[in-house]
Image (tube, rainbow, N blue to C red):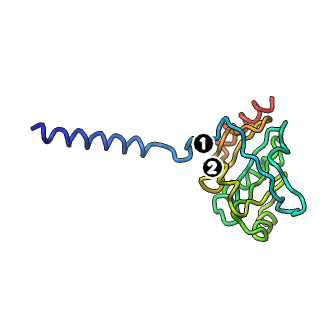
Amino acid sequence: MTRFLWPLIAFMILVMFLLVGLNLNPRKIPSPLIGKSAPHFQLQQLQELEKTFSSKDNLGKVWLLNVWASWCVSCREEHPLLIQLSKSKMVPIYGLNYKDKRDLALQWLNQFGDPYTASIMDSDGRIGIEYGVYGVPETYVIDKTGIIRYKQIGPITLDALEKTILPLVKELQG
């Protein structure tokens, strides 16, 4: 009897782990960078190649870093919210154009609008790797001292914007 009981118990434990795993939200993957300094970078700006932007340029400001690409379907989903947020001037949004071709990225911004204070090119994806990008789009809230306070995996939704991102930005700005 006990020789059948132990495999049954092991099977039940595996089923419980599976059920717990199926109920987890994949967008809530914790980032090891939360609460740590944002990785430093200095990259060429997308629109003006002779200009660069550095992550240190925003010390003293709360800002968003939005990782996007012209080939990203989900980026189109969140883009109207970024345009709306940009028009509100509540927080500057900087774009990190990830593993993209410059001409396609410029064409995409001309077609859908440009919500970014500046966009910078991460053609080889090196900066994305340093930020722990899982996929595009992703958005980071960075505080006045350069510390990453929040990471949105996937497109920004109205719910995430209103309930998480904007309240955090207001708290950090205060």
Q: Residue at x 79, y 50 (%)?
A: 94
- Between 124 and 99, which is closer to the camera in this rendering? 124
Specify the amino acid type for callout 1: Ser
Q: On the picture, is 137 further left or further right than 6?
A: right
Across and down, in percent, residue 146 comes to: 77, 38
Across and down, in percent, residue 65 comes to: 74, 48
Looking at the image, tell me whether mark 1 or mark 2 is earlier in sequence order: 1
Label 1 and label 2: CA atoms lie apart by: 8 Å
Specify the amino acid type for callout 2: Gly
Identify the residue at the far top of this view: 174
- Taking 154 as reference, is 59 above or below it? above
- Report which residue position mark 2 lands on: 132
Q: Residue at x 87, y 63 (%)?
A: 49
Q: Pointer 1 and pointer 2: residues touching (CB < 8 Å)? A: yes
Rate crowding at label 1 as few (under 14), some (14 to 19) or many (20 or more) other CA atoms within 10 Å: some
- Residue 21 lies in quadrant: top left
The quadrant in which the N terminus is found is top left
- Residue 48 lies in quadrant: bottom right
- Report which residue position mark 1 lands on: 31
